[in-house]
Image (cartoon, grey):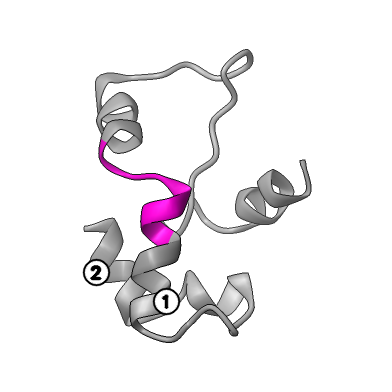
Amino acid sequence: MNCAGIHRSFHPHVSEVRSLQMDTWGEHHLKFMALGSNEKMKRFFEGFELMDESVQTRYKTVAADFYRK
């Protein structure tokens, strides 16, 4: 739950957290889940040597913006 709290503190254009029980899921949410994953994002950040940065810093980089798009 700590991770969800951190991500919920970001603006939705930076990181979005959805609950299976409390939130509604649209088709675009399902596509994001199918295409992405925590592991894929971690490998992406490792490629840019960003894993030693704080979560707040990593998710606000140009690299993270590129990944989201």
Disc 2 is placed on an element classified as helix
Disc 1 is placed on an element classified as helix
Magenta residues, dominant SS class: helix
Vertical arrangement, residue 12 with respect to residue 57, above or below: above
In the image, residue 60 lies at what x, y percent?
A: 46, 75
First to last magenta residue range: 35-41
The residue drawn where x is 54% and y is 31% is 18
**Gap between marks 1 and 2 measured at Cα:** 15 Å
**Location of mark 2 (residue):** 66
In the image, residue 59 lies at what x, y percent?
A: 48, 69
Neighbours of disc 2 within 10 Å: few (<14), some (14-19), many (20+): few
Compared across the picture, whether 6 is left or right of 20 comes to right
**Location of mark 1 (residue):** 46
Report the amino acid beneath label 2. Answer: Phe
The residue drawn where x is 26% and y is 20% is 27
In the image, residue 35 lies at what x, y percent?
A: 25, 40
The residue drawn where x is 60% and y is 70% is 55
* Number of on-image labels: 2
Name the foreground residue: 12 vs 27: 27
